Amino acid sequence: MYLNIEEPTERISTDAVKVWRISNSLGHLLALIIIAILGFFSNMFGWFDWINIVLYIIGGLAILSAVFSIVIEPIYLQRTWRYQIDQQFVQLKHGKWQVKHTLIPMEKVEYVRSEQGPLMRMFNLYKIEIGTTTSNHVIPGIPSEEAKLLKAQIATYAKIQDSDLVEGETGA
Amino acid sequence: MTDDLKKYHPAIIIVDLVSFVKGILWPFLFLFVIKASSTAIWVTWGRYILFIITIWSICSFILKWYFYRYEIVGDSIVVHEGVFVKKQRTVALDRIHNQKSNTTFVHKWFGLTSLTLETGTSGENATFHFPVITEVEKERILLHLEQKQDTFEDVAGEVIEKSPERTIHFRSTKKDLIKASFTSFSFLAIFPILTAMYFNLDDFFQIEKTAKNALDYLLGNDWMLIVILVIALALSVLIGFIQTSIKYGNYVISDDMERIYIDKGVGKFVSFSIQKHKVQGVIVEQTILKRLLGLASIKLISAGGSKEEDEEISSLYPFMPKQEAYRVLQTILPNYLIEEEMKRFPIKVLWLKLLHPYYVTILVIIGLMIFKKEWLWVAAIVLGLSAIFRILDYWFTSYIRHGNTVQIRKGGLTNETFVTHRERIQQITVKHSWLQRKFGVATLKFTNKSKPLHVSELYGVSKEEASSFYTWYNTPTK
């Protein structure tokens, strides 16, 4: 452990890997098809040479990115994602090479919502979105029962804490 | 605490009309004066359209005055808007973070003023604007506001002795104004004004030819040129001074137990007030020039700010001597203590910063390789500059945390010191990349409520400090 802190412990579902793999595959496939069509037209109508070169470069990058985001990335994302909810804070952590810890006080949470796409429905997963006044955060890939519970829990905690800060500050 | 629906003062029609005339002046001049003899179709149509717009606007101003209403009901203000589509907006008084009032020349003629209440939210309902109200009415609304917010405080269990008098902490003098007009370079403002005038007139008259003749004449007579330059310079200094006076003249900073008040302006008055406990943080800003002259500007970060042109208003007088600025801040917000002595990060952070890829340089190299190979030496200059900026960035970055307070300083050409408290931070992120782990450091990032959001990011904090920062924020308050 690099930082000497209390890290969050809850993991996300292993099915998230499959969801990411499928959706990233579809996305990249679509991108490659579009590039291929453009390349086809470029050859057929004799567009400028540099267009072909650019298309090859983009295509190459797309293939590299496909390998990374279909084969490698989902496993690491799933393995490194941690979250934890308690009365006071939402804690999130993810990433392997670039590790990111986020800490949101419950009293700043404005809304919580769950979302499920068609792919996620296949695996019975939800993602939870936590919104604050300043930004929003998504916890991906949570099994449906757990997601409902989590959502209710965040909502309850956040409501308990809902008060405008008026006490004045304790200061330096 | 209920009272009736109030209409705006009829002068609202005139205020709207004046701003409308301001907007329509140029098209009007163009269509009716400059193109007076033209019979082109688009000119004729343009005149009709202008005419219709004018009639429509005048009608809508009158209807607006007739239909728009506002009222104070219990703890909230309700605004009724719309002529055909009716709209009601409500805001709870305790949601209002700060208020501004703006008295233009037109307002002054009628002895009126305007008032804007700003809430902490964004979007359509973020601000409540009363374009034209009497001073008495403004005081009445503000009284409601203060009462409401006071009782709210009392409920929160705090005994606050009310002191109705304000203490004045700063009043700008002529000397301050002269300093300000030079530091803000406002004496250079004459150049954009002249150019704008030149191009605007040039569209209509052929002044380029006349100007050329005049220029030829001038170039022939050296002394004449010098005299004109001196006159122009004197004039521009004068104009700069007048501009600064209008903007920063009569600057008064005062406070009472509850609020901070900033009033300013000559001719056109602007005033601003914020509750002390709604200040989200304080920024001390120093440009190179201000650093040389020992001046500093202190800004109060608040959630209710709007992106309008009057951004300057939330700052304490921007050209105050640094020590005095600190003194004023100390008296009005004793919680925001600015620590002058700050430690730089260890030198290894500099190496780490220098080690990062030089993307701009790489892009420049690629660009030059393709388009202009013989200019490749430019890349070396770009590389040098980016290295210098990184060194400056390292040199001026520092961080300090004590008790409840975090203070960070960042800089280079402009130095910025930001102070905030734990309760004011909306969320934090601590992150570290592979390279940072090799150096034993991490990045801190925290967000404060403001408009736009105030995000502070600090690269190169030691991992021990990053851990204790995280734990510090993670400790429950209650």
Image (tube, rainbow, N blue to C red):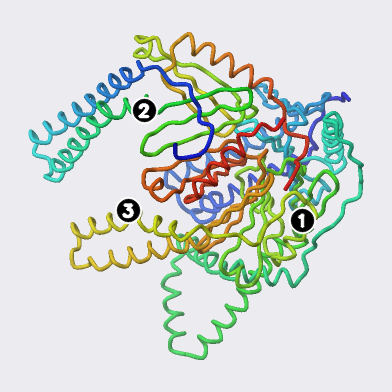
Q: Could you tell me which secondary element the residue under label 2 belongs to?
A: helix
Query: At 18% across and 64% down in the image, what residue appears?
Result: B373
Q: Is B226 positioned to the left or the right of B277 in the image?
A: left
Mark 2 and mark 3: Cα distance apart in space: 25 Å
Q: In this rendered view, identify the residue nearer to me: A129 or B192.
A: A129
Mark 2 and mark 1: Cα distance apart in space: 48 Å
Q: Position of residue B120 (x, y in %)?
A: 66, 35
Q: Position of residue A112 (x, y in %)?
A: 55, 20
Badge 3 vs badge 1, beta-carbon distance below 8 Å: no
Query: At 59% across and 28% down in the image, what residue appears?
Result: A89
Residue A17 location, quadrant = top left
Q: Disc 2 marks which amino acid?
A: Leu
Q: Eyeballing the image, is B327 above or below A14?
A: below
Q: Is B265 positioned to the left or the right of B4 in the image?
A: left
Q: Position of residue B228 (x, y in %)?
A: 55, 83
The chain holding disc 1 is B
Inspect this view and state whether residue A118 appears.
yes
Q: In this rendered view, identify the residue nearer to me: B463 or B410.
A: B463
Q: Position of residue B280 (x, y in %)?
A: 67, 43
Q: Disc 1 marks which amino acid?
A: Gln
Other-residue count near label 3 (Cα within 10 Å), few / some / many at <14 / 14–19 / ≥20: few
Quick check: do tags 2 and 1 share a chain? no
Other-residue count near label 2 (Cα within 10 Å), few / some / many at <14 / 14–19 / ≥20: some
The residue that disc 1 covers is B330
| Foreground: disc 2 or disc 1 | 2
- Give residue B357's mark: 3
The residue that disc 2 covers is A77
Inspect this view and state whether residue B453 appears.
no
